[in-house]
Amino acid sequence: MTIDATDRRIIAATAGGLPLVPRPYAEVAGWIGLTEEEVLARVATLQVAGVIRRVALAPNHYALGMTANGMSVWDVEDAVVDEIGPKIGALDFVSHCYRRPRALPVWPYNLFAMLHGRTKSEVEAKRAKVAALLGPACRGSDILYSTRILKKTGMHLSGEG
């Protein structure tokens, strides 16, 4: 799909997040001179085409009291990682889960799952639940704890912002 100038204006207007108002798409529409219906239709088309993957909240875990956040990394048998990965991602304490290529011999891990908790012991208990779900398909793991929040921003198109 080729995006046009209007699509680019919508993406640019929403890259920093939607406004916290009762009708955010109407607000965005007003900013760029469209109707709410036009913005909603274009966003839907962009989602169907895969240009926009999702519209979601990005909570500040620290503000919610989740100060022990760790990226768990797993060395999972390649034959089962695509089957078991979505099960890990569906756990209510996993905010995102994805497969990545290994970087052997230094980095044997191919499955990543971000775990959140109030304490490291809570996160370790959740890590144990993931390990139990993975069972013998898991050959090794580690966890990398966050030490600070990095700035999260939306996508910016080339030549903008």
Image (cartoon, helix red, strand yellow):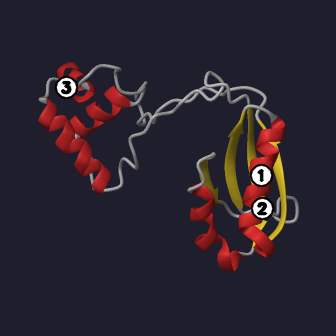
Q: Residues within 10 Å of mark 3 (few under 14, many from 20)?
A: some
Up-down relation of residue 26 to residue 88 (above or below): above
Mark 1 residue type: Arg
Identity, as a three-letter code, of the amino acid under mark 2: Ala
Near mark 1 (Cα within 10 A), the count class, few <14, some 14-19 or many ≥20, is many
The residue drawn where x is 43% and y is 24% is 161
Look at 35% across and 27% down and name the residue there.
18
The spot of residue 118 in percent (x, y) is 73, 31
Do callouts 2 and 1 mark residues in contact (Cβ within 8 Å)? yes
Which residue reaches farthest bottom? Answer: 79
Query: Residue 127: which disc?
Result: 1
Judge by depth and name the residue closer to the eye, 60 or 118. Answer: 118
Work out how far the residue at label 2 is from the one at label 3, CA to CA, in angstroms. Answer: 45 Å
Query: Which secondary structure lies at badge 1?
Result: helix
Q: Earlier in the sequence, mark 1 or mark 3?
A: 3
Image-quadrant location for residue 28: top left
Q: CA distance from mark 2 to mark 1?
A: 6 Å
- Which residue is the site of mark 2? 131
Expressed as whole percent of the image width and height from the top left, the position of residue 158 reads 43, 36
**Quick one: SS at disc 2?**
helix
Q: Position of residue 102 (x, y in %)?
A: 75, 64
The amino acid pointed to by label 3 is: Ala
Give the residue number, with chain letter if any, for mark 3. 26
- In this rendering, does residue 102 appear at all? no
Image side of residue 139 versus residue 89, left or right:
right
Q: Is residue 106 above or below residue 11?
A: below
